[in-house]
Image (cartoon, rainbow, N blue to C red):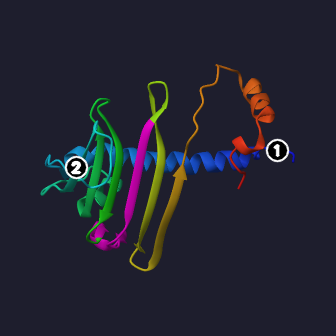
Amino acid sequence: GVTRLPEPAEVREKGARQQQDRRRVEHLRGGRPAAFDCPYQPTTIAPVPASTVTLRCSPRPGYSPPNHESQVLTGMQAEITIDVAARRMTRFEGTLFEEVNFAWGFLARLNRGGRIELRQEKVAGSHWGLTRMELHFDGRLVMVKPLHLERRESAWDYRAVPAMSVAEALNYLRRAPESSLPAAR
């Protein structure tokens, strides 16, 4: 079959959505240390490599979120796995154990049971990248409109490529096997 490259408008729209989601995730990641109490207790939550530590975290009393994205952390319990040698978080799984209101519920409300999962790992040499992002939240927007946020993204098989111009990158993509390109939506 012929490989169809996505139209520029499709690429821009998808890129804008991904950039917005990544900004939200970065706000969450940035607020995480101040938002949670994570006492160190060796756990056996799941089989993990010996070089990692998994922490069970609960909201820190008195935490004042710096932005709307971080507000969700006030009602969330989380498990965080850290690669001790690399000093990096490799997994963050959080679940809302209580309803979270934005602007006293006038702006939005997220229901109990909402989830977020983030995973990152070494993707090329010493570079780390987000390899999984899953969000699932339900609630209400402006008190009446149902809100459903569902997002799943996975990335794998990273490969370093040499530095190239835009024209060279387009030629590279045209020559790549169809199975290695993302599907156009």
Q: Residue at x 17, y 47 (%)?
A: 42
The disc, 1 or 2, on the residue closer to the chain's N-terminal end is 1
Residue 111 rendering spot, x and y as whole percentages: 34, 73
Badge 1 density bin: few <14, some 14–19, many ≥20, Cα 10 Å: some
Give 159 or 172, whichever is nearer the viewer.
159
Spatial separation of the CA atoms under disc 1 and disc 2? 45 Å
Question: Which amino acid, mark 1?
Answer: Thr
Residue 20 rendering spot, x and y as whole percentages: 50, 49
Q: Is residue 82 magenta?
A: no
| Residue 164 versus residue 61 in the image, above or below | above
Q: Residue at x 31, y 42 (%)?
A: 30
Q: Secondary structure at mark 2?
A: strand
For mark 2, what is the residue? 55
Residue 101 rendering spot, x and y as whole percentages: 29, 69
Q: In this view, which residue lies farthest toward the bottom?
A: 144
Q: Residue at x 28, y 72 (%)?
A: 99
Find residue 29 and name its label: none
Question: Which amino acid, mark 2?
Answer: Leu
| Residue 66 versus residue 49 in the image, above or below | below
Quadrant assignment for the C terminus:
bottom right
For mark 1, what is the residue? 3
Q: Quadrant of residue 128?
A: top left
Residue 93 rendering spot, x and y as whole percentages: 34, 55
Query: In the picture provided, is 132 more to the left or to the right than 185?
Result: left
- Provide the residue span drawn in magenta: 100-121
